[in-house]
C-alpha cells in the first residue's frame, strides 16, 4: 500500500517539478491571471476588496505591516504573486481551490511572527499566494462554559483583553507578546506565564475549524482525532489553513502578584541562576519565575545581568513566605512586588513601554519591530556554575550588546501531560527551556552575519549542556539552521532531521497524518512535515 502510494506520489511530484522548473517567467503573468479569474468565477463580489497584487498601491503595506522580524523586509526576498486577506471562511476555500488548480503555492499568515518569515516568504521557485488571516478576527467568549471561539487572526493581546472584559477570573495560558497571532502560536504550542499551571495553549484547544487540501471545511468531529492531534503543536501549515479554535479558558484569581528582581554578576547572579535551575521547575505551580540574561552596565563597568521576572497567582502576603521557603537567596522584598489583576499582569509581561494600560494590549498600538535571530534548547540537568561562567563570557562580546537569553521553567502541569498527548514532546524531564536571541539595529543590518555567527557560536558552546539525541528545539522559535529544504522536494528522511528535534518520535505520527490528509503535499514549506516515507 505504502509503496504504491509513494510511487504515485513521486510521479505527481516529479511532474509538478518539471512544470515548475521549466516554467518561463512570462507564464507567471498567466498563472496570476488564471488565479484571479478563478477567484472571481464564483461571482463573489466581496473577494475583490481583499485581493492585492503588486499593481495595487497597498500591496507593499499589506505585505510589510505583519512582518515582525524586519530583517525579512528586503527587496531581494521573493515576494508573493498575490496576497488575499479573506473576510470569510468561504474566501479561504476559494483561495485554496484556485491556488491548487493553478499551480500556486500557499503561505498562511496569521500574526506574521514566524522567526524565519516562513508565513510570507518562500525560497521555492514556484509562485505563491499569501493567505493573510488578519481579518478573521472574531472572538466569542462564553463565561458559562468557560470557552471561547476565536478566529486565527486574533492577536494574543486581543484575546486576553476580550476574556478579561467578560470575567476577571478567566484567562488563557499562551505567550506573553500581545502582537503574536493565534494561528501560528497555538498550532505550534504556545507558552507563557501560565504554562506551569495549565500547560501550553495547544493543550487547551478543544475544537478547531480547518480548510483542508480538498478545500473542505472540517471541525474536530469531521477532521477526526489524528488531524486534530497534529494541528495542536505540529504547526498548522503542513496540514491546511486553520480558520478558528475553540479554547478552554482557565481560572485566574482576582489578585496576582508580579516582580522583577535584577542581579548582576557582582550581585551573585551566577549562584542565583545556578540555584534557580534546581528549584524553578519544582516551585508551587502558582509561581512562575523566568530569567532574562543580558549584557548590562553597573557603575560604567560592563557586566551580565539576570532579571528574575515572576507571576504569582495570589497575593503578596502568600508569596513572601513561599519565596522565603523555596528561594530565600534571591532576597525578595515586599517592595519588589506589585499586586494587580491578571489582565494587568499581561501588560506587565508584554514588554510594552512603561505607562501602558490594558487597552494597549489591542492592535491599535504597533509593537516595536526588530532585526533578530533566535534559537532554542531544553535543559534536562542543571548546568554547572563553571559552564554558566563560560556562557557569561560570551555576553561580554560586542555582538551581545542587544542579546538576550530567556530561561523558562517547566514542571507543574507540563510534567503531567504525556509527551505524546499532542505533538509538542518536551515534557517531564525537561526542567527548563533556553531561548537564545540576538538583536541588531538598522545601521548594523549590513553586518547581520556577525550577529548570526555570534549566536551560532553560543549555540555550539551550549551543546554539551542541553538535551541530546536529538537536541530538542521548540517549533515556535523556528530556526532554519536546524535543516530546511529550499527546493520544495523535502524527503521524509531529510525532514526527520529537523522534525525529530521539534517533535521527537511524534514526527512519525505527524508524517502519517500528513500522508492521510495531504498525500500530494500541497501544503508544504521549507520545514513542513512530508507524507510518511516520501522520497
Ligand atoms: C516578539 C515575539 C514574542 C513571542 N513570544 C512568545 C511567547 O511568549 N511564547 C511562545 O510560545 N512563543 C512566542 N513567540 C513565538 C510565536 O509563538 C511564533 O512565532 C508563532 O508561530 C507566531 O504565530 P503568528 O501567527 O504570529 O505567526 P505567522 O508568522 O503568521 O505563522 C507562523 C507559522 O504558522 C503558520 N500559520 C499561521 N497561521 C496559520 C493558520 N491559520 N493555519 C495554518 N498555519 C498557520 C505559518 O504558515 C507559519 O508556518 C514570540 C514571537 C515573537 C516574534
Ligand atoms: C460572497 O461571500 C460572502 C462572504 O462569505 C458571503 O457573505 C456572500 O453571500 C457571498 N456572495 C455570493 C454571491 O456568493
Ligand atoms: C487591486 O487592483 C485590482 C485591479 O485594479 C482591483 O480589481 C482590486 O479590487 C484591487 N484590490 C484592492 C484590495 O483594492
Ligand atoms: C482586511 O484587512 C485589510 C488589510 O489590513 C484592511 O485594510 C481591511 O480594512 C480589512 N477589512 C475588514 C473588513 O476588516
Ligand atoms: C531590571 O532590568 C531590566 C532590564 O535591564 C530593566 O528594564 C528594569 O527596569 C530593571 N528592573 C528593576 C526593578 O531594576
Ligand atoms: C552574595 O553572596 C554572599 C555569600 O553567599 C553574601 O554574603 C552576599 O550578601 C551576597 N551578595 C548580594 C548582593 O546578595
Ligand atoms: C531537490 O531538488 C534540488 C534541485 O533539483 C536537488 O539539488 C536536491 O538534491 C533535491 N533534494 C532532495 C531532498 O531530493
Image: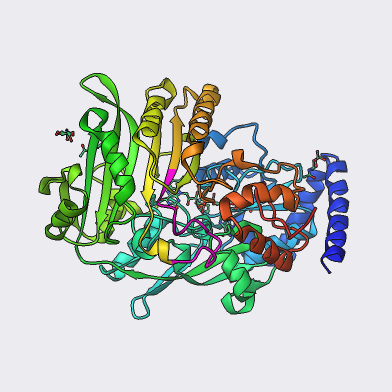
Residue 205 vs 233, above or below: the answer is: below
Q: Is residue 430 magenta?
A: yes
Percent of width and height locating residue 47: 63, 61
Task: Write down which quadrant ligand 6 falls in.
Answer: top left
* Residue in the picture at 52% in, 23% down: 450
Image quadrant assignment for residue 256: bottom left
Q: Is residue 404 magenta?
A: no
Image quadrant assignment for residue 61: top right
Residue 353 appears anywhere in the view: no
Camera-nearest residue between 535 and 77? 535
**Residue 351 appears left or right of 497:** left
**Residue 9 appears left or right of 184:** right
Camera-nearest residue between 19 and 79? 19
Residue 266 vs 206, above or below: the answer is: above
Percent of width and height locating residue 398: 41, 20
Image quadrant assignment for residue 140: bottom left
Residue 376 vs 506, above or below: the answer is: above
Q: Which residues are magenta?
A: 417-434
Quadrant where the image shows the N terminus: bottom right
**Residue 216 appears left or right of 27:** left
* Residue in the picture at 71% in, 41% down: 486
Percent of width and height locating residue 309: 27, 46
Residue 61 appears anywhere in the view: yes
Percent of width and height locating residue 365: 36, 47
**Residue 488 appears left or right of 309:** right
Name the dominant secondary structure of the magenta segment: loop
| Name of the residue lying farthest toward the top | 300
Q: How is the image coloured?
A: rainbow
Tally the numbered discs.
0
* Residue in the picture at 44% in, 32% down: 439
Amino acid at each position: 500500500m505504502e509503496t504504491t502510494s509513494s510511487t504515485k506520489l513521486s510521479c505527481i511530484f516529479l511532474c509538478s517539478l518539471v512544470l515548475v522548473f521549466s516554467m518561463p517567467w512570462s507564464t507567471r503573468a498567466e498563472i496570476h491571471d488564471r488565479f484571479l479569474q478563478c477567484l472571481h468565477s464564483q461571482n463573489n463580489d466581496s473577494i475583490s476588496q481583499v485581493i492585492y497584487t503588486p499593481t495595487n498601491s497597498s500591496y507593499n503595506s499589506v505585505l510589510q505591516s505583519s512582518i515582525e522580524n524586519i530583517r525579512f523586509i528586503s527587496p531581494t526576498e521573493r515576494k508573493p504573486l498575490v496576497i488575499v486577506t479573506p473576510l470569510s471562511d468561504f474566501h479561504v476555500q476559494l483561495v485554496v481551490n484556485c491556488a491548487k488548480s493553478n499551480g500556486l503555492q500557499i503561505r498562511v499568515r496569521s500574526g506574521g511572527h514566524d522567526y524565519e518569515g516562513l508565513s510570507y516568504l518562500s525560497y521555492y521557485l514556484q509562485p505563491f499566494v499569501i493567505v493573510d488571516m488578519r481579518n478573521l478576527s472574531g472572538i466569542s467568549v462564553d463565561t458559562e462554559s468557560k470557552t471561547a471561539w476565536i478566529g486565527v487572526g486574533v492577536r494574543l493581546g486581543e484575546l486576553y483583553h476580550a476574556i478579561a472584559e467578560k470575567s476577571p477570573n478567566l484567562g488563557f495560558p499562551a505567550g506573553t507578546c500581545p502582537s503574536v497571532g493565534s494561528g501560528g502560536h497555538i498550532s505550534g504550542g504556545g507558552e507563557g506565564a501560565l504554562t506551569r499551571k495549565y500547560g501550553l495553549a495547544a493543550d487547551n484547544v478543544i475544537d478547531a475549524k480547518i480548510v483542508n487540501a480538498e478545500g473542505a471545511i472540517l471541525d474536530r468531529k469531521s477532521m477526526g482525532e489524528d488531524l486534530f492531534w497534529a494541528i495542536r503543536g505540529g504547526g498548522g501549515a503542513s496540514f491546511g489553513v486553520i480558520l478558528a479554535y475553540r479554547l478552554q479558558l482557565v481560572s485566574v484569581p482576582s489578585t496576582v502578584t508580579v516582580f522583577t528582581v535584577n542581579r548582576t554578576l557582582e550581585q551573585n547572579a551566577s549562584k542565583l541562576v545556578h540555584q534557580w535551575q534546581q528549584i524553578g521547575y519544582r516551585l508551587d505551580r502558582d509561581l512562575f519565575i523566568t530569567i532574562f540574561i543580558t549584557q548590562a552596565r553597573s557603575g560604567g563597568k560592563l557586566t551580565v545581568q539576570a532579571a528574575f521576572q515572576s507571576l504569582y497567582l495570589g497575593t503578596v502576603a502568600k508569596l513572601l513566605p513561599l519565596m522565603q521557603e523555596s528561594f530565600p537567596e534571591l532576597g525578595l522584598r515586599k517592595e519588589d512586588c506589585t499586586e494587580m489583576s491578571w489582565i494587568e499582569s499581561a501588560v506587565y509581561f508584554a514588554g510594552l513601554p512603561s505607562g501602558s494600560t490594558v487597552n494597549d494590549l489591542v492592535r491599535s498600538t504597533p509593537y516595536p519591530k526588530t532585526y533578530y535571530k533566535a534559537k532554542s534548547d531544553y535543559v534536562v540537568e542543571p548546568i554547572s556554575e563553571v559552564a554558566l561562567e563560560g556562557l557569561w563570557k560570551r555576553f561580554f562580546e560586542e555582538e551581545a550588546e542587544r542579546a538576550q537569553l530567556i530561561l523558562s521553567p517547566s514542571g507543574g502541569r507540563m510534567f503531567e501531560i504525556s509527551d505524546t498527548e499532542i505533538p509538542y514532546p518536551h515534557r517531564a524531564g525537561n526542567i527548563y527551556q533556553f531561548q537564545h536571541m540576538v538583536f541588531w539595529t538598522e545601521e548594523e543590518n549590513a553586518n547581520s552575519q556577525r550577529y548570526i555567527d555570534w549566536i551560532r557560536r553560543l549555540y555550539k558552546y551550549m551543546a554539551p549542556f542541553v538535551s541530546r539525541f536529538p537536541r530538542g528545539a521548540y517549533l515556535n522559535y523556528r530556526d532554519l539552521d536546524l535543516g530546511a529544504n529550499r527546493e520544495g522536494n523535502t524527503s521524509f528522511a531529510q525532514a526527520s532531521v529537523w522534525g525529530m528535534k521539534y517533535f521527537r518520535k511524534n514526527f512519525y505520527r505527524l508524517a502519517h497524518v500528513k500522508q492521510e490528509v495531504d498525500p500530494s503535499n500541497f501544503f508544504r514549506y521549507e520545514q513542513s512535515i512530508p507524507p510518511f516515507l516520501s522520497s
